[in-house]
Image: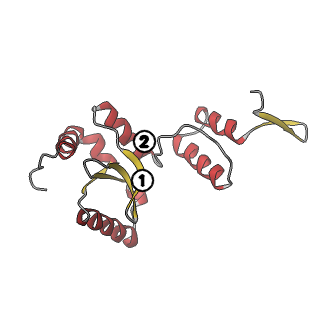
Amino acid sequence: MGGETSHRERIPVTSPRRTIEDLPAVLPSYLVRRAKRQAEFLKYELRLPTDRSRSDLETDFLSFCRRHYLPLPEVNVKVGRWEVDFLWPTQRVVVETDFFDYHRGSQAFEDDHQRELDLRRSGYTVRRYTGAQIDDYPAEIVVELGEVLRGKPVPGR
């Protein structure tokens, strides 16, 4: 642990970085992400590896892409004035993953739809998937995403 511990009132304590690294052994992933956000808000330089995901659903979607051999997208990037969950820039494809707890309320509903309209008007193909869809209908999502990423039309879209 060299350099990762110090003493405060004769009690050994670990650095913020080391503490965050140790948290996955004792906390659920959503609390680890919350601790990382709080540490970064307090301006601690953590320099931890990250996939840039901000929720379990986003992490699950990246795992879904790997598991089904889909090309990996950019994560949480700006497209115009909007930040999107996932982007394949060359194909101009955006995927938004939706979880009810984060998308409740009329303002979130309106913002989501305005973002989608703006992106479509800018030439992006937008797909939205819920956690339940990713779990329950993976084959359909793989087919649909595979088609839009290869530039083939998806019927009814």
- Residue 6 vertical position relative to residue 2 in the rendered view, above or below: below
Residue 58: x and y in percent read: 40, 46
Q: What mark, if any, has residue 37 been given in the picture? A: none
Crowding near the residue tagged with mark 1, few <14, some 14–19, many ≥20 C-alpha atoms within 10 Å: few
Mark 2 lies on residue: 59
Residue found at x 39% / y 67%:
108
Q: Residue furthest top?
A: 1
Q: Secondary structure at mark 2?
A: helix
Could you say which is closer to the camera, residue 79 or residue 139?
79
* Residue type highlighted by circle 2: Thr
Report the residue marked by disc 1: 77
In terms of image quadrants, where is residue 59? Answer: top left
Check the image and tell me how it is coloured.
secondary structure
The quadrant in which the N terminus is found is top right
> Mark 1 is on which residue type?
Val
Q: Secondary structure at mark 1?
A: strand
CA separation in Å, label 1 and label 2 = 15 Å
Please state if 26 lies on the left or on the right of 81 as rendered.
Answer: right
